[in-house]
Amino acid sequence: MAARSSNLRPVPKSRSTGKTQNSNRKYVRRVLSTERDYFDYNLLAIVILLTCFGLVMLYSTSAYEAMLESAGDDMAYFRKQAVISVGALVLALVGSQIDYHFLARFSVPIYAVSMFFLFITKFIGREVNGAKRWIYFGPISFQPAELAKLAVILFIPVLIVKIGYKLKGVKAPCIVFGFGLLSAAFTYVFTENLSTAIIIAGITVVLVFIAHPKTAPFVIAAVAGAALVALVVLILVNSAANSENFRIRRIQVWIDPESYSSLGGYQVMQGLYAIGSGGFFGKGLGNSAQKLGALPEAQNDMIFSIICEELGVFGAVLVILMFVLMLYRLFFIAQNAPDLLGSLIASGIFVHIALQVVLNIAVVTNMIPTTGITLPFVSYGGTSILFLMAEMALALSVSRQIRFK
């Protein structure tokens, strides 16, 4: 800043006193050195836009099923989601005003509470669609796996910052991996939620990768892991044709959905029919045929296929671009965060959103086996939108600490 100040042309001495010159120079230096507060309104705008778009698509997708299940009330799903979304957005705006360093102090209790809820889900959880993933407190339902994702996004960065330079060794990264993978294991074992377990593990690995000074071990591990997964899938497909394990069946459905239509291939094929029939501009908002009972869980995991059917390739690309813009803003916050903690928190949120969007679209288009994973801000789910907004509050809180000169 001193270099910039030295290039300023001085006030002429004629008609000016020495006192005036000094006051002018002090004013210019003060203006040049003032730090401008920042708040990422672009991220806030894209969150609101995606939420509104999700509500429109949710009503279009769920109106028929809501009429059947709620005595003719076609807005049952929409109304519940809209109320939770508006409330969660207000809480996110309030939460964004809290310093993330203060929130980080509660990372250990939040992590411990998330592990506790994951554990008790196995025993007191209510079974929905063949899996115990929900805990009910009277009329309020809660999915602990969503809390686990937020807990890892907050706890792992705090742990990495506390470890500091020791992370470049061997023991310290293993400790970080241990806590992340323990949460993933609890999610898989006690809630049978493989997709969320994969996301939690992915968040942990990427955060350690970002903070670790070496790249080669991660590249080697990624290549070896991909080869191992491919080998396991090949063995399972060739040796377990009549297996009763539902995960093996999902792999079989993925490879040949028509031959295994009674085991889950029906949903995959109906989703692909919806995507294929949409064309470039779609059939028009509200004109989907597959949502009229043909496509199970259309408002949840498969809502992207209805977007493709009603809005076509144009609508699908538009949704993807909105997510790309959200990820860009999260990347910007991570790059400009004032410290490593803020950068890692924003990076964790980035990884979560990116993984969930990619996995959901990959499932709908049958690029990977079916997993129960929703499209962020678009699919139906009160717990999901609540914790997604909590993550956005964290990201906005980090953005408030950015200073531009």
Image (cartoon, grey):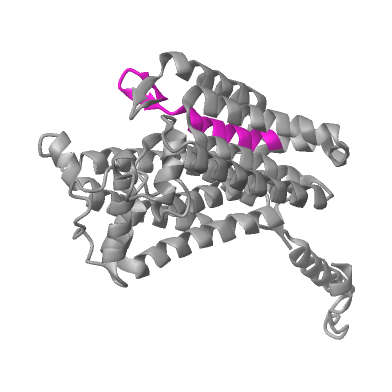
Give the vertical position of 363 relative to 35 (above or below): above
Foreground: 43 or 229? Answer: 229
Quadrant occupied by the C terminus: bottom right
- Most distant residue in the top direction: 123
Query: In screen coordinates, is 342 left or right of 83?
Result: right
Residue drawn at x 46%, y 19% as measured from the top left: 121
Residue 397 appears in the rendering: no
Is 27 magenta? The answer is no
Residue at x 29%, y 46% (from the top left corner): 266
Q: Quadrant of the N terminus?
A: bottom right
| Nearer-the-camera pick, 329 or 90 | 329
Q: Left or right of 56: which side holds 115?
A: right
Q: Position of residue 223 (x, y in %)?
A: 71, 51
Is 304 placed above or below 9 here? above
Which residues fall within the magenta stretch? 132-156
Give the percent coordinates (x, y) of residue 126. 36, 20
Q: Relative to the observer, which residue lies in front, 290 or 100?
A: 290
Q: Is the residue 371 above or below the residue 28 in the image?
A: above
Indicate the position of residue 46 as horizontal and vertical percent values: 46, 58
Residue located 38% across and 38% down the image: 87
Is residue 146 inside the magenta stretch?
yes
Q: For the view shown, which residue lies furthest in the left direction?
A: 72
Does residue 118 appear in this view? yes
Give the x, y percent position of residue 232: 59, 41
The quarter holding residue 104 reads: top right
Q: Would residue 57 be found to the left or right of residue 348 on screen?
A: left
Comparing 224 with 136, the one in front is: 224
Q: Residue at x 89, y 75 (%)?
A: 6
- Quadrant of res 380: top left
